[in-house]
Amino acid sequence: MARKRKGDKVDGWLVIDKPLGISSAKVVAAIKHATKAQKVGHGGTLDPLASGILPIGLGEATKTMPYIVDATKSYEFTVKWGTETDSLDSEGAVIRENGDIPALNTIEDTLQQFVGTIQQTPPAYSAIKIDGKRAYALAREGKDVQLKPRPIEIQSLTIINNSIETNETTFKVQCGKGTYVRSLARDIAYKLGTYGYITVLRRTKVGPFTLDHAISLEKLNDLSHSARAVEYVLPITTALDDIPAVAVTEKDAEDIKYGRSIHLATAKQGTIVLTVNDMPLAMAHSEDGQVRPLRVFNM
């Protein structure tokens, strides 16, 4: 007999506006406490020094996590010019300094070079593994961390504010998977012939999730005392808004549940969401009318 999983069966998404000074793992722990959900996971880590959108998958929603991790993200970030730190943010130690502050028009003229598919070297203080060990752990040990450049996609990059008083510029960026905003700030500074590090980083959008969907951790903690936290849980399919949904019969649903392929001549090619009786059934792959289940939801 299968062991009964501890906790309540809660399926869906909670979108947290993560505050500064707390790790993504601690947010997950707080969600577990507030919702009593059997299974909880987050869609894309935010550093303790970053705030903003942190999608939390509950129960069966964790099966859609790859679609959120791969989704387009938007950030607002502020760069302080003339100085570089080892962590590329305000927590690190100063390693380079020239005091050069770029003019606003020069910054504006440079941004277009960072839009599109570009090569980016991740920061040494990142979670990338090198020989089985996290890069940030090696960096903290004083090791020389050498990471290879990789292609990323910057869809848009604009200036929100420029302050002569503080020598800081605030940007908004929309980007694809694997983009390190701290590295983007460093590279913009290099292109301008100076140095820079991030003083503020806020994620404003992850796939379909925006700040309009978000709830603060403080409010969530208050709700946990009244057992109302689950009222803020969004449906599983919220994360799949841009993926075509196809309704199937109960007979076809039975085949899908057992991992068997079905034939649907009208299904679009590629990844689709199967539903039965208005309930999510499975993520599936459709090709030439043959539909193969990828992840089946236990609803």
Image: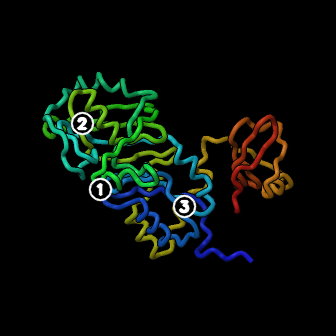
In the visual, does 171 lie left or right of 254? left
| Callout 3–callout 2 Cβ contact below 8 Å | no
Q: Quadrant of residue 80?
A: top left
User: Badge 1 local density, few (<14 within 10 Å), some, or many (20+)?
Assistant: few
Alpha carbon distance from label 3 to label 2: 36 Å
Which residue is label 3 attached to? 233
Q: What kind of colouring is applied to the model shown? A: rainbow
Res 76 seen here: no
Q: Earlier in the sequence, mark 3 or mark 2?
A: 2
Residue pictured at 58% horizontal, 59% vertical:
12
Q: Is residue 267 above or below residue 106?
A: below
Q: Earlier in the sequence, mark 2 or mark 1?
A: 1
User: Badge 2 local density, few (<14 within 10 Å), some, or many (20+)?
Assistant: many
In the visual, does 155 lie left or right of 2? left
Q: Is residue 74 above or below residue 44?
A: above
Q: Mark 2: which amino acid?
A: Thr
Q: Is residue 37 above or below residue 167?
A: below
Residue 123 appears at what percent x and percent y? 35, 43
Which residue is label 1 attached to? 141
Q: Earlier in the sequence, mark 3 or mark 1?
A: 1
In the visual, does 278 lie left or right of 261? left
In the visual, does 26 lie left or right of 162? right
SS at mark 1 in the image? loop
Residue pictured at 63% horizontal, 74% vertical:
5
Which residue is label 2 attached to? 169
Alpha carbon distance from label 3 to label 1: 41 Å
